[in-house]
Amino acid sequence: MSLKAPRTCPKFSLFLFFLLFLQLAQAQYDFGAVDQLLEKNKKLLGNNVVALVWKDGKLIYQKEIGADFNGKTQAPIASCSKWITAATIMTLVDQGKISLDDPVSKYIPILDKYMKGYITIRQCLAHTTGIDGKGGLATLLQRRKFENLEEEANAIAAKEISNNPGKEFAYGSSGLNLAARVAEIVSKKDFCPAGAGKDHASFENACYYLCK
């Protein structure tokens, strides 16, 4: 004797599956609360806002507020670029293309010329290169302009060192800009908008991104 399942069973199961799938999809892409939050705080944000969310290489959310400001507008973001630099470096680490404990001189040999071949990528991200310990704010204000990130990395290599790497925390731009140059070399992509160095004292003041 065989047991026959009612034909409505698989249909109902299929219905439940699609209901669950659509519910998850709707929850995943419902950015209504984000829209409301951005609109509510647009004055606080200067009335110029761009929010982009990417998932699996696809743009799934885009919100633009401001007539002259959109997703393609280049904007100076100063030290906000540091987390982008770190995220890019960690992406390359995840891909197995670099290691945090690689000496930066492996990619920027000029550091060896100035006896800085032992500085690692990890120390660059941690502000412990020993390069930014002297000068303070006055040095930042006197920073010269550079045509590209390679030129700036070469200038950083020639700077006087204030302490051995890993011995002293000193917040600055040197380490992150060296790391950004490593990202350029490894990825073979420009890390900064063309000509950014002409308009800013440092690429630290440029909108960092790896051009696709």
Image (cartoon, helix red, strand yellow):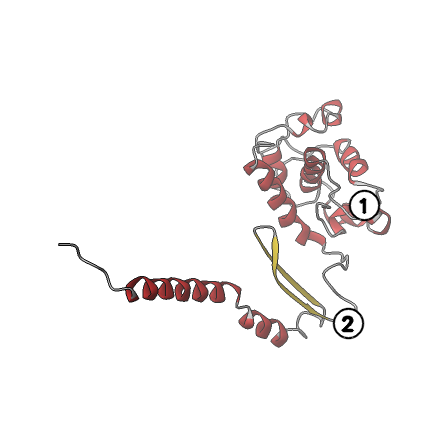
Q: Position of residue 101 (x, y in %)?
A: 57, 30
Which residue type carries mark 2?
Ala
CA separation in Å, label 2 and label 1: 33 Å
The answer to which image quadrant residue 60 occupies is bottom right
Q: Nearer the viewer, residue 91 or 10?
A: 10
Say whether residue 100 is left or right of residue 75.
left
Query: Which structural element holds mark 1?
Result: loop
Question: What residue is rendered at 38% in x and 62% in y?
Answer: 17
- Name the residue beneath numbered marker 2: 67
Q: Position of residue 165 (x, y in %)?
A: 62, 32
Crowd class of label 2 (few under 14; some 14 to 19; many from 20; radius 10 Å): few
Q: Position of residue 120 (x, y in %)?
A: 61, 31
Q: Nearer the viewer, mark 2 or mark 1?
A: 2
- Name the residue beneath numbered marker 1: 143
Question: What residue is rendered at 82% in x and 49% in y?
Answer: 196
Q: Nearer the viewer, residue 87 or 67?
A: 67
